[in-house]
Image (tube, helix red, strand yellow):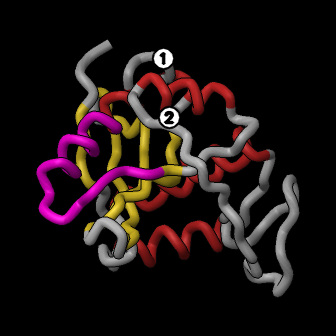
Amino acid sequence: MNEITVRPATADDLEAIVAGNLAMAQETEGRQLERETVRSGVGRLLTDPSRGVYYLGELDGRVVGQLLITSEWSDWRDGMFWWIQSVYVAPAARRHGVYRTLHTWIERTARQTPGVCGLRLYVDRHNTRARQVYARLGLQPTEYRLYETDWGNSGRPARRGESRRDGR
């Protein structure tokens, strides 16, 4: 396999990212997301970097992996955590270091960016393979549990396995 390169996404990558998000939600959580809602959300982010930045892993000019970085201020650390989200690697490119390359690039960039105090991500507790990958890269589970109230577009919280219009 040739070298994997990493680059920030552009508006031209909209459809590739949408496809990755739809596939990831279906594969990891059994969720059928609404394409137009995901497309709108990704499009909105791609035109406003204050919301986050997608980074893509490419092989031979083809997008084979993606992740999204969003930020969260930590008053305890007087710094910004970068949250890794929307991780997806195309099935044919798995086990070839795509995520490792993306993660290593993000970690190096974060360490070189003043004010960034660490990386965080959340993973579905049933996604054993992803948890193993993250552990091999040095990420550790925390003592915190994630709680949420998610109205999506329906006005009520979505349940596991249920389609949520906003994808989260």
Q: Nearer the viewer, residue 21 or 51?
A: 51
Q: Secondary structure at mark 1?
A: loop
Q: Which residues are magenta?
A: 103-120
Q: Quadrant of the C terminus?
A: bottom right
Give the residue pinned by disc 2: 89
Check if residue 69 falls in the magenta segment.
no
Residue 113 screen position, x and y as percent: 14, 57
| Residue at left offset 51%, top offset 26% | 133
Residue 137 screen position, x and y as percent: 40, 28
The quadrant holding residue 124 is top right
Q: Is residue 7 above or below residue 1?
A: below
Specify few, some or many for label 1: CA neighbours under 10 Å numbering under 14, 14-19, or 20 or more: few
Residue 11 is at least partly visible in this image: no
Q: Is residue 37 above or below residue 10?
A: below
| Residue at left offset 49%, top offset 37% | 140
Q: Nearer the viewer, residue 119 or 156?
A: 119
The quadrant holding residue 127 is top right
Instruction: Identify the mark at residue 144; answer none if there is no mark.
Output: none
